Amino acid sequence: MTNAQTSPKTAPDDRAAWTALWALVIGFFMILVDSTIVSTAMPAIMRGLDTGINGVIWVNSAYLLAFAVPLLVTGRLGDRFGPKNLYVIGLALFTASSLWCGLSPSIGMLIAARVAQGLGAAMMTPQTMTFITRMFPAQRRGAAMGVWGAVAGVATLAGPILGGVLVDTLGWEWIFFVNVPVGLLAMWRVWVKVPQLPRHSRSFDWLGVVLSAVAMFLIVFGIQEANTYDWGTIVGPVTVWSLIIAGVIVLVGFVVWQHFNRREPLLPLGLFRNANFSLANVAITAMGLAITAMSFPMILYLQSVRGMTPTMSALMIAPMAVVSGVLAPLAGRMTNKIDPKVLAVPGFLLFGGGIVAYGLLLTPDMPLWVLLLPPVVMGIGSAGIWPSVSLTATRDLGQSDAGAGSGVYNTTRQVGAVLGSALIAFLMEARISVESTAVLATMPQTGDADSAGAGSEATMGQTIPEFLHGAFSTALGQSLLLPGLVAVFAAVVCLFFRRPVAVPETRG
């Protein structure tokens, strides 16, 4: 069977479709929370596993990298073996690896467990959008995307808050242990409430998988380790620059292979003939970068400069999650009735402008109530971004392209997140080093100044010397300009959205 309209079992009514969607978003919420929950737990993980900032950043980057690379193929696997089956397998892997994360005795073991988590998340994520595209008629898909966008926005922004509460009350291990009961609940709900959808025969481009994985790893490793090796030699003839250049070359090779692969390429370049799909992928890449990169400087400022606990620092950015969660469903319903750019453009401007404003406000004595204002603006912007961009990317796609399209869309978002994690780590260390060195150069060589050397290396989890608070605040504020300006760039991209073409009301 290839057409869901011929089978009542695979063409659920609206009520059944909504029930299935709510079952799916439990697991979707969980995996997105894990994209950001580590940020507030970083100091505790560093102390508990005796590691440095680079090691703990790899805990986040390893998850994001393992999440991003397989997404292009897991969308196809869902088409081939059934999106429900692949979602449940991925959820089981994610849940089991969460237990492994919490039991990890070393930083290396934790990074390995996070890779397994990322693979499970990669199996789940494309299936969620595939279900929305195939179960909901076109004119009601915007409301479903609004729910999806609300879950994505709240989960990504609420991760640090949940992480802070768990670290303060139970310990860093519980940011992973909490996934186990949630994962079991999600598996039960999906098994009972989500229907089996028709499968499409697919071939798999394994050479494309290898090329894309190698390219991503080389680029991300090179960027993230640049400060560690001072942009120089890593081992023998291998340098930071050679890794990044090699990654770009392999990436070009991947795109060329996709062009000449006449069977069924991993990345169907034909999808990008649709202007809305192409522009939406650029925009969501920028969103993935911005939303991942912004949390590290904000949390480091609040904990290391202002001396807040993980919970308090996370609550300072809570308005983003609250406002986004309230407004995103409304924005989703509006997306069906208006041009998506009407929401996307101001959404990105508000989101990026809020980040930039936050960065400019970072001083050691800035009143805390003032720092609560930019997150409200960012939450309003985020609410308009998720449903409008997601619907723009998928509404013009046919049913046979749903899996491939959602896989590409989610891949680009995760690629942005991976690059955001790597770039912000590099930028933070670089700017803190410059600003701290400038302050220390003006001071007499006393014991206090010498002891501040550790502070200039941005050791998370420790309160830095008071005379370096200004330097740290300035450096972290400068770092926030990166995600802020990237979001503003996305607003310009969204100006070119076209009104989506009408799609026949089909399900399946």
Image (cartoon, helix red, strand yellow):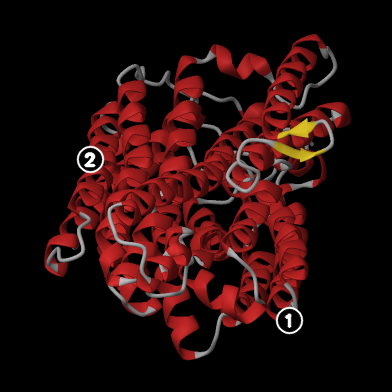
Percent position (x, y) of residue 7? Answer: 70, 43
Relative to 370, is 103 on the left or the right? right
In this view of the protein, which residue sits in the foreground, 220 or 183?
Answer: 220
Observer-nearest residue: 430 or 494?
430
Q: Amino acid at mark 2?
A: Gly
Which one is nearer the viewer's eye here, 495 or 334? 495
State yes or no: discs 1 and 2 in contact (Cβ < 8 Å). Answer: no
- Relative to residue 255, is residue 291 depicted above or below? below
Mark 2, Cα crowd under 10 Å, few <14 / some 14-19 / many 20+, is: many
Q: CA distance from mark 1 to mark 2?
A: 40 Å
Residue type, label 1: Leu
The residue at 32%/40% (across/down) is 481
Closest to the observer, 43 or 280: 43
Residue most extreme to the bottom: 169
Task: Name the residue at 69% across, 72% down.
Answer: 98
Query: Which residue is rendered at x = 43% and y = 21% of the image?
Result: 502
What residue did someone put label 1 on?
A: 103
Q: Earlier in the sequence, mark 1 or mark 2?
A: 1
Instruction: Estimate the x, y position of residue 269 in percent, counting from the top left.
Output: 66, 16
In this rendering, the answer to whether 284 lies above or below 375 is: above
488 lies left or right of 422 = left
* Tag shown at residue 353: 2
Q: Position of residue 476 (x, y in %)?
A: 34, 52
